[in-house]
Image (cartoon, coloured by chain):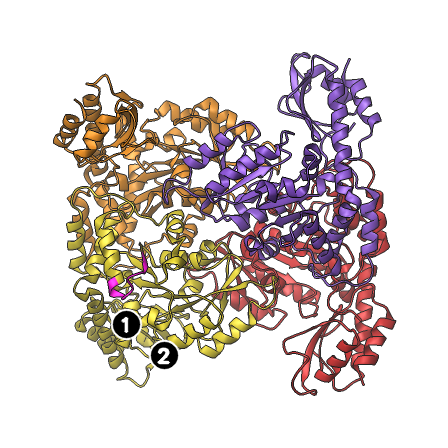
Chain colours: A yellow, B orange, C red, D purple
Amino acid sequence: MHFASDNSGPVPTQVLESLARANDGYAMAYGTDPLTEAVEQKLRNLFEAPEAAVYLTATGTSANVIALGTLVQPYQAVFCSPVAHIQEDECNAPEFYTGGAKLVLVPGTDRMTSDALRATIENEGNRGVHGPERGAVSITNVTERGNVYTLAELRALTGIAKEYGLPVHLDGARFANACVALNCTPAEMSWKAGVDVAVFGGTKNGLMGVEAVIFFDPDMARSFAHRRKRGGHLFSKTRFLAAQMDAYLADNLWRDLATRANAACARLAQGLRQSNRVVIENDPTANMIYASLPRAWHQRATAAGARYHLSGGTLYNGDPDTLLTARFVTDWSMTDAQIDAFLDVALP
Amino acid sequence: MHFASDNSGPVPTQVLESLARANDGYAMAYGTDPLTEAVEQKLRNLFEAPEAAVYLTATGTSANVIALGTLVQPYQAVFCSPVAHIQEDECNAPEFYTGGAKLVLVPGTDRMTSDALRATIENEGNRGVHGPERGAVSITNVTERGNVYTLAELRALTGIAKEYGLPVHLDGARFANACVALNCTPAEMSWKAGVDVAVFGGTKNGLMGVEAVIFFDPDMARSFAHRRKRGGHLFSKTRFLAAQMDAYLADNLWRDLATRANAACARLAQGLRQSNRVVIENDPTANMIYASLPRAWHQRATAAGARYHLSGGTLYNGDPDTLLTARFVTDWSMTDAQIDAFLDVALP
Amino acid sequence: MHFASDNSGPVPTQVLESLARANDGYAMAYGTDPLTEAVEQKLRNLFEAPEAAVYLTATGTSANVIALGTLVQPYQAVFCSPVAHIQEDECNAPEFYTGGAKLVLVPGTDRMTSDALRATIENEGNRGVHGPERGAVSITNVTERGNVYTLAELRALTGIAKEYGLPVHLDGARFANACVALNCTPAEMSWKAGVDVAVFGGTKNGLMGVEAVIFFDPDMARSFAHRRKRGGHLFSKTRFLAAQMDAYLADNLWRDLATRANAACARLAQGLRQSNRVVIENDPTANMIYASLPRAWHQRATAAGARYHLSGGTLYNGDPDTLLTARFVTDWSMTDAQIDAFLDVALP
Amino acid sequence: MHFASDNSGPVPTQVLESLARANDGYAMAYGTDPLTEAVEQKLRNLFEAPEAAVYLTATGTSANVIALGTLVQPYQAVFCSPVAHIQEDECNAPEFYTGGAKLVLVPGTDRMTSDALRATIENEGNRGVHGPERGAVSITNVTERGNVYTLAELRALTGIAKEYGLPVHLDGARFANACVALNCTPAEMSWKAGVDVAVFGGTKNGLMGVEAVIFFDPDMARSFAHRRKRGGHLFSKTRFLAAQMDAYLADNLWRDLATRANAACARLAQGLRQSNRVVIENDPTANMIYASLPRAWHQRATAAGARYHLSGGTLYNGDPDTLLTARFVTDWSMTDAQIDAFLDVALP
């Protein structure tokens, strides 16, 4: 009954097997080994982007911020949602890697609307040197509140960015979950939808720690390699990052894992909907649910060993009927039995 | 015959087994899991430092520069050797993580002498606000040229730093090889020798990618956790870093691996010394040799598949008798047969 | 009829005379001259703060951001109004000088309320290393919308900062205008109200370009001198900054100039209120008015040579009756005749 | 007898008069006033560079480092002399404004030789992502040791930079003194000699505090305006910087002032050469002398009120015959009588 995060789950055995296979004698360091080069090519193939510049990093934050540092100047602005991971959960890493660029927040509670994005861009970057220049737009799909932008919504946002000549970064920590929810290809959710740089996340979807950063225009990536090294994110034994990604790509494991995680979420949502005391705040088509339940129900579930995060409030005082919002995240390894066990204890 | 670097070698099976053991169901993310906490305690025990603040990172550069960023201010200076890894091989990462501190180089070709360090410190930080303040001293053991500071030499350097009130950082990418060469304990080579912050390297000694940063005064570490996160170096699935370090510490595997690497180096040195055409430039008590051989010998060895780096010059033109200096690094996995095979082809 | 900004006005002759007096032979550079030291002492006296650390800089942005860089760490947050000069008009200088700290905006349209400040602080800095630490609170008086915090309001805000152990920075670009509006002393509006670091602005109140940064706790100022130099803001011929400030302090010229500017603003407000078509949006007790007038009136005034900034909209199309908001700023040199001339052309 | 620095001298009355003239009513702020635009055009004319992008700043450090920040990336290297002002006397400002670029020092004691520059560039930027990329070359004329590069020497250095595709920055804090020493035009000493960005210093040659930064290729200057603002170096009342530069350019005052300073230096050198106990270490064709005199002579001169800096050593102990090296700098205002008075007391 562990819904705290999809980065709390185990890794599939295929990943361990791939690491063992890669652990064969000597290999040149720093990404010049054959396996790394082969995996980069497989990613180009997956994204139908033969010219793309592809880089591996070990954490989602590093993937996002090295990409942003490559796209924007220190005196520019990055437009994003107020709840974007780069704004809320990366401890000023975007400011650090961009040399001090400003994250300008598009008013809203999760997904950016086209109107809000346009108005925010209009309002910024029009004060000469007094305010920051417009730099880039950053979009997250699956969003931090568990919603999924449709391809049409993505195209609308990237279209606005293009009007202003701004590159678009896609935070794809849950790229696979969104692809499955949209039943689309990686290309359709990235460059075909106007994305310039996509992070193809692996860590939250079953890898130990690997993300791929894909620049569809290699010219835009010119400084990435130096910025990755300068950030301390170039691994000497890159083959062990590549090995994880290699297993992830084989037989579409990435899609299979996300399909399982999303299915677990759907089962959880269906179960929660049995109670009219439960309000599900997002459209749980991916692998994350924000739902409000009575405090007493949370207490019961927690006492029984369920793990997940509450948004504000605390379990241990006040009215047992107060509705508290919790975040439930499902991962590839979650079984129906685990979900049903939670529903049994949580719901009366 | 692969002497290019000790980060080109494989990992011992104990590491893969430890990863498999750690891959058991759910674990809280970001270092709050029991395995990570247990490994941090084991490191405190190994270093005989019950109060130490211990952190894991995945790369040597990140370990060094997050530590330096914690120790020095942007308007200060870090004193180090002109060939230090932080100066030569980290692509301005120290400047990045310190917010622009200056590396002030202590004249010399490898090891810092006490006199040179003192003179350099004296010459810097005496110009009021016009020059940088004195910030910290950084020492590398094993050095980048394969030499090993004795404990007395370390104490002399840290003693000078203390005179000026400067904290001492130890780049320990090859900490284990130095410990074995000196036949001393980790405590003797770190805090007992006046080191304030030590990097206990694992990657170059057989791990996939894990280093431990150990602050012997936890107050000095106050900002490390935020700086690690801000640098994108906090892993969500920290258990898989901890698992590698756990295997490394079990039954003193770290010391066993370094002992093997150093022994391989000694065998290689002994073999090279059979020829009076070979000049070994360092004292190869650890796992690295800088030696000059005739160009023709390099050509023969390279043609036979030997891999290692030459310092300047090239193999493919000029006088076959010209002496070219090469760097040979041995790792834990190198067999006597591999070394002998190299000697057979390289030496006439 | 020039209401564009109080930094568009001339300087009083006393300032030129003081520069001429200071231009006497040789003086040691970089602030070690007697005049600079004398002026620093006069500022300590003015602020009734014999222990204060006092620094001169030439621009308001440099005064604010060097101060903030001294107060906060790169992984921390600065709490301020969404319309604060540091957020809107300094082109990411605060992010630059703090090494990438984040400005966290307190919801509102100008003045921060105690409740909003407390809620914003509460909401930030409670996510462990995932979000920034709480760093400092920055307040502007006179605000960017022409309002003046009362001493009680200041004390309430600084009291909340103190609860969280956060230092308070006061952007005093219009410090003198606020002092006059509140009829209080510099001490009452700064350290007696809980401010830790105050910028005592001179440039917008008649100097060519000098601001004083005053740390009431000198320990808090430890790195300011190095940060000022590193920012390129230490003048070699500091005597010419000191000379301006010396004239500013003599016979309370600073207060006299602000009194004139505020009086001009009051006269302008009184005049505008003659028309019921005019809506004044702030309480114009200092030297700035935000007022909405019909588009046609702006066109008439502009055609007659009046100069001021409109917030959005444009003069040259659409309905002549549309109300457009303009910012009118008065300075020490403005005459009643100039104000009346404007009123004559602007109002029917 | 004040030889401490040319930034210790007074300003010519023409500068005060120009400030008074500029102090006439209202002027738009931030460099959009007519005087600033006129002065920028006069600088283009002086440099015979109609397309040049011209910017004013108030300090030499800001002029240098905003220019460098515009030229190089954070992961690059700036090649300069070990005694360059940017290395020795700007407290890490270059690292700050470039976001952490590394100053790579060209071995030598003052002037860079072509061979040393080429060897240093060759040795750097050839390690892939492990070392910094080559970024720019920075040259100082007059050098920090009082020497003057000939036009041929400048062309040789810039020619090497061009071979590697590197832009060239000229620190011209004493640009005028070098121009006079070389009897050349500003164009000949800058773009005609291969310089891409020149700082035309005013502060050390008689202004209160103004430098002009001139980009001969305006495309190269694209980010300068934003970087200047972000550094806090855009003055609101720019007219008062422009007024100083306007006086400096009128009737070639800049050249007249430098001619006087250089002549004073020549007189001082001639006087010092009367004694065979004096060793002059540089070729004093500009306005700075490094000369060694017996300690006792320094004591006598200092006791008589002479002011200048000694390189190392102290006046007050040891052998009176020890030769101590002193730096003597002459400025435009120095009279023959002052120089002769010094010679009378210093020399027996």
Determine whether, in the image, residue C189 is placed left or right of residue B277.
right
Region of the chain picked out in magenta, as a range: A45-54
| Magenta-span inclusion, residue A50 | yes
Sequence-wise first label, 1 or 2: 2
**On screen, residue A250 above or below C217:** below
Please give the name of the residue rendered at 30% of the width and 65% of the height, measured from the top-left corner: A5
* Residue furthest to the right: C337
In the rendered structure, are the residues bearing label 1 and label 2 in contact, judged by CB atoms less than 8 Å apart?
no
Secondary structure found at label 1: helix
Percent x, y of residue A112: 43, 75
Secondary structure found at label 2: helix
Q: How many marks?
A: 2
Q: Amino acid at mark 1?
A: Cys
Circle 2 chain: A
Q: Amino acid at mark 2?
A: Ala
For this rendering, which residue is in front, B199 or D194? D194
The residue labelled by disc 1 is A179
Q: Quadrant of residue D263?
A: top right
Percent x, y of residue A347: 26, 79
Q: Quadrant of residue C38?
A: top right
Circle 1 chain: A
The residue labelled by disc 2 is A152
**On screen, residue B103 above or below D234:** above
